[in-house]
Amino acid sequence: MYVLSLPYIFENDEHVFRALDGEAGKELSDGLLNASGMLRGLAYTYCGGFRVTPTSGVEINTVEDFSKLTMAYPDSPITKDTYEALKIKTYATQKFETIKNTKANLINGFVSTYPRYANSGEMPIANVVNETRETVLISNLVINDEFYKKLPEEFQKIISEEAMSAAKVEREESIRIGEEIRKSSNGKNFKFVKLSKEEIERAKKMTAVVYERYESAFGSELIKKIINAK
């Protein structure tokens, strides 16, 4: 599943949906079931959608600006290597202490999504929201496979279809919340900075080393399936 957190592997929401609802998503779900022996993936939801980087005053307009960031040391090895490639400094801290550490000036930026930013107390401490869009935060709806197989076939079909329907609703809601936050914050003490296409292309080149490092683990074909699902 770590393959989904490769930097800039997704271009936009439609690309994400085609990859997750298509061949690549099915391959990942099959792998989850084979590896766990009990978790059957039903559908992929957003866990807030495309990532943003709220900061206490730091604007990310170019790839060089990433070096101005100090962020919490990441749990994910993919994210750790992405930070290194973008020259983001890290601070070792306990998980979920974002607000505390930002107030103490130990970090000046953190990973978030628009739904989380609006509802978790992050807005008052981070007045700049950088749409860096390196990754998409994704969840997976799963069901116990043993229980699933005991159900009548018609019930299996209903559960699978309704899980997909619910996932699509959640994705749409995540996107809507982001749009509403940008609109409602217009003229207030918040600034939204969007990394340009040119700078995203530069960031892709800087983080290509992450792909090289993990290609053998994920398999080049799976990575291609995700990238080509545009």
Image (cartoon, rainbow, N blue to C red):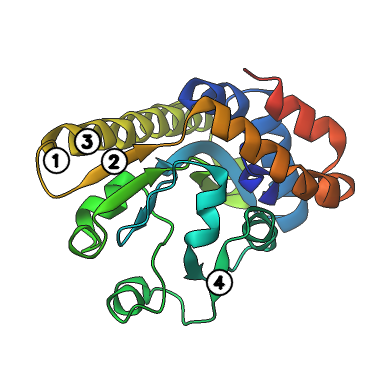
Tell me which numbered mark, 3 or 2, is placed earlier along the sequence.
3
Q: Which mark is residue 185?
A: 1
Q: Residue at x 75, y 26 (%)?
A: 225
Contact, CB < 8 Å: mark 1 with mark 3? yes
Contact, CB < 8 Å: mark 2 with mark 1? yes
Q: Which mark is residue 217?
A: none
Tell me the crowding category of disc 4: few under 14, some 14 to 19, or many 20 or more residues within 10 angstroms, Cα based: some
Secondary element at tag 3 = helix
Task: Choose between 172 and 157: the one closer to the eye.
Answer: 172
How far across and down, in percent of the image, does residue 132 sit?
A: 47, 42
| The quarter of the displayed image where residue 88 is located | bottom right
Q: Amino acid at mark 2?
A: Phe
Specify whether 223 is left or right of 111: right
Contact, CB < 8 Å: mark 4 with mark 2? no
Tell me the crowding category of disc 2: few under 14, some 14 to 19, or many 20 or more residues within 10 angstroms, Cα based: some
Contact, CB < 8 Å: mark 3 with mark 2? yes
Q: Amino acid at mark 3?
A: Arg
Secondary element at tag 4 = strand
- Which residue is the extreme one toward the top? 230
Contact, CB < 8 Å: mark 1 with mark 4? no
Q: Residue at x 25, y 61 (%)?
A: 122
Tell me which numbered mark, 4 or 2, is placed earlier along the sequence.
4
Secondary element at tag 1 = loop
Q: Residue at x 67, y 37 (%)?
A: 204
Which residue matches tag 2?
192
Task: Choose between 199 and 186: the one closer to the eye.
Answer: 199
Secondary element at tag 2 = strand
Q: Which mark is residue 90?
A: 4
Which residue matches tag 3?
182
Q: Amino acid at mark 4?
A: Thr
Alpha carbons under labels 4 and 2: distance apart: 23 Å
Q: Is residue 83 visible?
A: yes
